[in-house]
Image (cartoon, grey):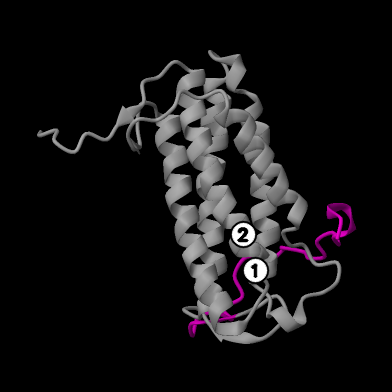
Amino acid sequence: MAEQTFREPRLALNRIYTRGGDRGTTNLVNGRRVRKDDARVEAYGTIDELNAFVGRAVEDVRAAGETCPAIAPLADILLRVQHELFNLGSEVATDPDALGERQPRVVPSQIERLEREIDVMNEQLRPLRSFVLPGGSALNADLHVCRAVCRRAERRVVSLVDSCSGPDLPCRYLNRLSDAFFVWSRWACQCMADPEVLWQPNLSP
């Protein structure tokens, strides 16, 4: 399925609260009522949390771009990822047997694009001789938060797929995206000439 065949949103958010969830339940996209601690809600809720952290990283990239123009393209990449995460959330928030043909979702070409971006940026990086710790800059730390939350979202989606035999593309996308956040965090440090913080097992406070 090509990305442009997805249907546009058909909703009007005029009322923000409905009181419908006051007893701890909510509707999935296909209308089934579930508890708010349901595994499917936990999965798409974690994807939503990740999207919020990516939004923070976008703004940090834009701010960094004022003094380091070379980093500006990363903002466009992260903004695209936000849209892809919303598509992913739509898919995960729907029972697999109720997914519409034109419903937004992740597609293989998005995973392939992430792989190409990882390869291009990784080729520019110095080889690692140790694991890296989050830090060196605020942007690096933000991207590591995105990576860690992405891994949590992946774990939630893996549990969901195991319990309901859903499609594996969401797991593959999140797995590749977490790798991308790692490479983007390193690339951001190098681009802005910030030091990477390497893990030193014997370092004492």
Question: Of helix, strand and loop, which one carries label 2?
Answer: helix
**Magenta: predominant secondary structure element?**
loop
Amino acid type indicated by mark 2:
Arg
Mark 2, other Cα within 10 Å: few <14 / some 14–19 / many ≥20: some
Side (left or right) of 27 relative to 9? left
Side (left or right) of 203 relative to 97? left
Please identify the residue farthest to the right as the structure is shown: 5
- Residue 37 pos. (x, y %): 46, 79
Q: Which residue is at a point 68% across and 76% down the rendered structure image?
A: 94
Q: Quadrant of the N terminus?
A: bottom right
Q: Which residue is at a point 52% across and 53% down the rendered structure image?
A: 50
Residue 203 colored in magenta in the image: no
Q: Which residue is at a point 60% across and 83% down the rendered structure image?
A: 164
Quadrant of res 105:
bottom right
- Residue 84 pos. (x, y %): 69, 52
Total labels: the figure holds 2
Residue of label 1:
168
Side (left or right) of 75 relative to 56? right
Contact check, label 2 and label 1, Cβ < 8 Å: yes
Residue interval drawn in magenta: 1-26
Quadrant of res 169:
bottom right
Residue of label 2:
172
Q: Which residue is at a point 86% across and 71% down the rendered structure image?
A: 101
Amino acid type indicated by mark 1:
Asp
Quadrant of res 136:
top left
Please identify the residue farthest to the top as the structure is shown: 67
Question: Of helix, strand and loop, which one carries label 1?
Answer: loop
